[in-house]
Amino acid sequence: MTQSAAFDFAWQKENITTVLPVSISVITFIIYWFTTKSGKIKSFFYRKFSFDDAAAYHITFLRVVGFITMGFVSGILCLIFIPDYSLTDYGLSCNPETALPTALWSLGLMVIIIPLAFLGARKPANLVNYPQIRARLWTRKIIVMNIAGWIIYLFGYEFMFRGILLFPLAGELGVWPAIAINIAFYSISHVPKGMNETMGAIILGLVLCILTLASGTIWIAFFTHVSCPHQQLHSNEISPGHAF
């Protein structure tokens, strides 16, 4: 039996490199999550705009909030309180040495994920969560807002998960403990979307963490995630003006 006296509760300077990224990731994701669940915010858009515009503006607003909280705020706080790490250290860089493997892995994962996503797009379980924008009539404006908002959101999302919550922990704790922590957070964030997405997040999370650390950048994870068509467009949303 381990005695509590054996543990050293004294704060060490290097603890900031692991404690801050984990704390920031949890707090910013919680802020974003409960913003998405705010009935007051949703009702504001639906009172102010027509139904279709409100649906598009509301989801776009939430995606921008996600970028600001998980991406911008997290990044700024880490740069301030962990000055030894730069944006490059968090995977925001273009590494010439890994540029070709990054492109090939991104394309390879897209080839696998896109058909799988399309095959599952019409399943009832998938329609519960997607499309996120529930517009009745999809105009070009709504399609552009949907894609742009998705890209902006995912940049902040992947910067947090595959940058802030991975590189510093891998440097301090080692690769596999960092990957385990990352997968735990990543899979838990998908629990509200059901068993299939949660289990898929475990598998995809493992692959993306390994490739992110190997390439030294977040771009494989970012481009792979952006390519998921069931998140961006539903099969009935491809043609502008098509009624949903």
Image (tube, helix red, strand yellow):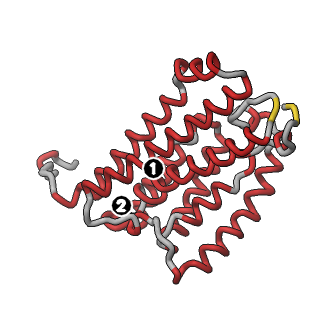
- Residue type at the position of mark 1: Gly
Identified at 70% across, 34% down, the residue is: 133
Q: Which mark is residue 169?
A: 2
Viewer-closest of 2 and 234: 234
The answer to whether 53 appears left or right of 159 in the picture is right
- Residue 6 seen in the current view: no
For residue 143, which quarter of the picture? top right
Secondary structure type for disc 2: helix
Identified at 84% across, 41% down, the residue is: 240
Q: Earlier in the sequence, mark 2 or mark 1?
A: 1
Label 2, label 1: how many angstroms apart (C-alpha)?
17 Å
Considering only vertical position in the picture, is 128 above or below 44?
below
Quadrant the C terminus occupies? top right
For label 1, the crowd category at 10 Å Cα-Cα, with few meaning under 14, some 14 to 19 and many 20 or more, is: many
The answer to whether 242 appears left or right of 116 in the picture is right
Q: Position of residue 23 (x, y in %)?
A: 33, 45
Residue topped by disc 1? 71
For label 2, the crowd category at 10 Å Cα-Cα, with few meaning under 14, some 14 to 19 and many 20 or more, is: many
Viewer-closest of 111 and 244: 244
Identified at 60% across, 23% down, the residue is: 45
Q: Which mark is residue 45?
A: none
Secondary structure type for disc 1: helix
Identified at 16% across, 57% down, the residue is: 12
Residue at the farthest bottom position: 97
Considering only vertical position in the picture, is 214 above or below 33?
below
Q: Position of residue 238 (x, y in %)?
A: 84, 45
